[in-house]
Amino acid sequence: MRILHAASLAAALLTAGSALAHDYRAGSVEIDHPWSRATPPNANVGGGYLTLRNDGEEPDRLIGGSSPAAERVEIHTMEMEGDVMRMRQLPDGVEIPAGGTAELAPGGMHLMLIGLAAPLVEGERVPLTLEFEKAGSVEVELAIDAIGAGGAADAHSGH
Amino acid sequence: MRRARIVLLAGAAIAVLASAYAASLVVSRGPVAGSGGLVSSTGTAAIGGPFSMIDDRGERVTEADLTGKPSVIFFGFTYCPDVCPTTLFELTALMERLGSSADDVNFVMVSVDPERDTPEILHEYVKAFDQRFRGFTGTQEEVDRITEAYKVQVERVETEQSYTMNHTASVYLMDSDNRFFGTISYHEDQNAALAKLERLAGA
Ligand SMILES: [Cu+2]
């Protein structure tokens, strides 16, 4: 695993800026594979998913974001309570503990892109600015995956 | 304390009697011949019942339009980023696996957010998944009526600048007489879900 990681890092360095390297950094926070799903036409919202790793000594916090693709970006969480899907906004954002990880993934915490200017199209990339309490802001790109990516009927698993 | 409890109990008893009475009214007024399935003598709440809504082509639709074919009914809203598109996507995959027998089943998404889900918006939304999907919406009262009939939980949640909806994410299976047949839960194994749909299609 470690060797694999080193190898992919080397590859990323060699082809700096290419599609291979789909992670970003803001201060001590690494932002790993920001992605979303294609949206049906007329959908006004899209999700945003990513993994945040904090290798610093201090906790940090994802507090917001913005994107030219949407009117606004909010941080939400979703959970199943029995058969009921509940979603709410996280006004204080998401904490990334020192030396720890925060995961925004389907079925849990996510970014909400609200007021989409146009549907999110599979294969495209959407610019997104993430706002951290300490690390400041960083520009990333959401890779748009298939409409059902990451679900039970998802044929290709593993991102 | 004790007195309060007795009052509460009495209140609960009255509420139970009142809802039983209300249910009997709905049943006796039910226009569908097959709605005998609504009567529940065991005390378990019956799921389903009469409704009147607007479909995604802008036409009035009632439970009578679903009669004669079994139905797969999902309650959701188009401002839903995860559960609703995922459910529709998975149903689309199941329809494919069902093959031609999927043509003999109604596939319906009922909006729990009529304020934003107009027939036009629903139309494009559901058809993006499969042409056989139909979308139902209506006035708030019409939506309240069908969600109450199907025992679907719906809650509006305010966000800083807007709102979102909490809702039951299960898929409802109804037989060709509009009687409750079962559910597919959100995290149901897809092979188990397919088996249920196959049984439904043959029912
Ligand atoms: Cu959300």
Image: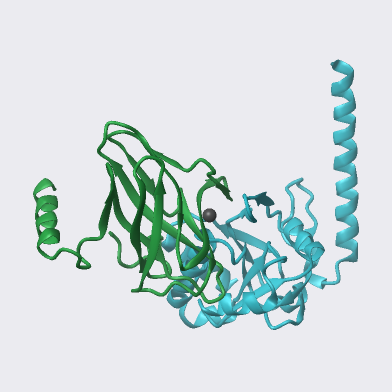
The C terminus of chain A appears in which quarter of the rendering?
bottom left
Chain A shown in which color?
green
Q: Residue furthest top?
A: B1
Residue B75 locus on image (x, y percent): 63, 62
Q: Residue at x 33, y 59 (%)?
A: A140
B160 or B194, which is in the foreground? B160
Is B47 situated left or right of A6 in this image? Answer: right
On the image, which quarter does residue B84 sit in?
bottom right
Q: Residue at x 57, y 45 (%)?
A: A82
Residue at x 90% of width, y 38% of height:
B14
Residue B48 falls in which quadrant of the image? bottom right
Taking the image as shown, residue B138 lies to the left or right of residue A72, namely: right
Indicate the quadrant where residue A128 lies: bottom left
Residue B163 rendering spot, x and y as whole percentages: 65, 55
Q: Is residue A76 above or below residue A121?
A: above
Q: Nearer the viewer, residue A68 or B37?
A: A68
Residue B93 appears in view = yes
Q: Position of residue A83 (x, y in %)?
A: 58, 50
Q: Is residue A153 visible?
A: no
Q: Which chain is cyan?
A: B
